Amino acid sequence: MFPFAGIVAFMKRRFKIIPTVTETGEAFSMIAKFQSLPYFPYLVRIIPFAVFAALTLAQGQFGETGAYWIYALKTLVGAWLIWIVRAHVKEMRWNISWESIVAGVAVFIVWVGLDGFYPMLGERSGAFNPLKSYGEGSAIAWTFIAVRVFGSSLLVPMLEEVFYRSFLYRCLIKSDFISVPLKSFNLIAFLIVCAGFGLSHYEWLPGVLCAVVYQGLVIRKGRLGDAITAHAITNFLLGLWVVFQSAYHFW
């Protein structure tokens, strides 16, 4: 229950309520208690992303092999958070269209194709390469690689698209972001979100470009699911590229 500890403390101070949660299985009922609060739509879109991002920052703090275990941990936590908020984030639904497939493949090509042709934002502390740490034939190394591909292809798209393309973009347009249709276009919000998404990656240039594509897809289709699918395709193809081309610097 640790991801909600901060929320509980905040709610106790701000709204004078003390939710009773004794078991993990009661997470749903706890969220139901918060549903009537004015900040609820913000929390269910911010907290999962924030927890996942915090664990990402922690990856490099526990040594080379520690990073693999932290990634496995954040994958489990991310999946759990998505599961318990899924009913309250209506736009977090997968949609497959020809546009999402084309966008996903195109962004992958751009991401790989631009490598080495622009200055990076700092230097990586080290590539995510379990084979180097445990050996080519190590079962645990391939398990960590499988977890990485799974997490980046299925969980990251949902967490990032909900936060950036749904919440942050619409919140920059209007504080009551739920009332803003996903197909709405606002140039300032568009530029801020694309820049912010890009600068959150070492590969800032393809990051900005892919944000333009994903946000444009949301606006074009009027739903988030196509961007989630495109993001998943990009990350899955990148994962395959990393493994089969030994291009672990992308991780």
Image (spheres, helix red, strand yellow):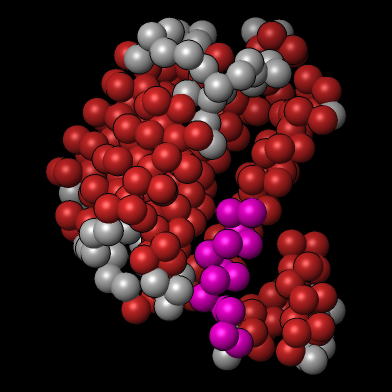
State the predominant SS element of the stretch in magenta: helix
Depth check, front residue: 121 or 181: 121
- In front: 122, or 4? 122
47 in magenta: yes
Instruction: Determine whether 196 is above or below 140 in the image.
Output: below
Rendering coords of residue 107 (x, y %): 30, 30
Residue 158 shows up from this direction: no
Is 237 on the left or on the right of 213, as rendered? right
Residue 163 counted in the magenta span: no
Asked which quadrant contains residue 202, the reply is top right
- x, y percentage for residue 156? 51, 44
Q: Is residue 83 above or below residue 27?
A: above
- Residue at 84% in and 79% down: 22
246 to the left or right of 210: right
In this picture, which residue range is highlighted in magenta? 37-50
Assign the N terminus to one quadrant of the image: bottom right
